[in-house]
Amino acid sequence: MTKSLKSSLVRRAKRVGALAASAALAACAQTAGPNGLYKTPIGNAPVTTNPTPYTAGLVCLGQYARSSGIASPRVAVGRIVDYTGKVELEGGAKVTQGASLMAISAFAKSGARLVERYDTSVSELELKYANNKLISDGAEGFRKIHAGQVPGSDFYLVGGITELNYNIHSSGIDAFGGDVDATDPKGSFTRRVFVMNVGLDLRLVDTQSLEVVDVISYQKQIIGREISAGVFAFFNNNVFDIGAGGKALEPIQLAVRSVIERAVLEMSANLYGVAGPQVCSYDDPLSTYGASGNYTVAYTDTLESNNAYTREDPSRWHDSRDAGVRTYLRGRYE
């Protein structure tokens, strides 16, 4: 066997081996593991609350109203629509379409009595079934329909996200330095900043008279930053090109939530007859209002164990952070 033929066979064997290894890896990637998954997703951050700088104000307002015996009027939230018309290149909306849901959560944090008007499809269907005597309530037989069983709202909130302005301001610097000698180290630095904003207009309407009793127009600016640096150098006949950097944009949707919470806070203060934030000096340790929102107690013995403050604990119910859940899992899999 000639030397050239031998080297050719060796090269072919290496190629066949590489193809076989690739096929084996591909086969492994397509085989589900004992847990039924091909791969376990990365990340195990716990679920946390989603506060804004105005959440604490909403919570303290609810505490003040509760401790002072101030009854909240019934509030309904209607459509808060995205009127900006801005979309991503892929076709999705640039601004959240869930502003109404954010407003509902904000009113809940303030301790307001909420009545559902945003999505009544299930209630309407059940009312239709009850009217035809198709729904049973156990021993009481079919569900009865009583006049006035649905409480009405005193006020409702509507409006829209009306502004999304890009690049209100931008600035930056690009620098490059180094010796004129081609073999000496060179360095570069880049920093950029830009500002945009989002705005919305909301109105609170008296449900019975349709009189607009409160109107608020707010905007919030959003900042974005980008920074990078690099070094290029020769050392011992080797080339080194090192770069590092990062970029961050303040979340647009969190900015929308902040604007909504500020507007709801101001409107709720009017509804409660509160002059200003000085009422936040009052602290009620037994309050059941918190950053996660308000809730209705189904069983009275859960008042302390399931109040809104405990819901703010990021370790609660987490399978690797809550001791109670870990104990259950250990007993389950033994």
Image: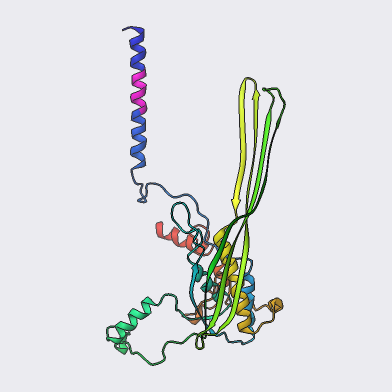
113 or 42: which is nearer to us?
113
Q: Nearer the viewer, residue 280 or 263?
A: 263
Q: Residue at x 27, y 86 (%)?
A: 132
Question: Which segment did they paint magenta?
Answer: 11-18
Residue 289: tell me if it is visible: yes
Residue drawn at the location 62% of the way across and 39% of the way down: 244
* Observer-nearest of 247 and 284: 247
- Residue 9 vs residue 274: left or right? left
| Quadrant where the C terminus is found in the figure | bottom left
- State the residue lying farthest toward the top: 2
Color theme of the render:
rainbow
User: Residue most toward the bottom?
Assistant: 147
Q: Nearer the viewer, residue 154 or 8?
A: 154
From what the image shows, is residue 317 above or below residue 23?
Answer: below
Q: Main secondary structure of the magenta part?
A: helix
Give how far across and how far down residue 24 sits, in percent: 34, 34
Residue 207 placed where, x, y %?
50, 85
**Which quadrant does the N terminus fall into?**
top left
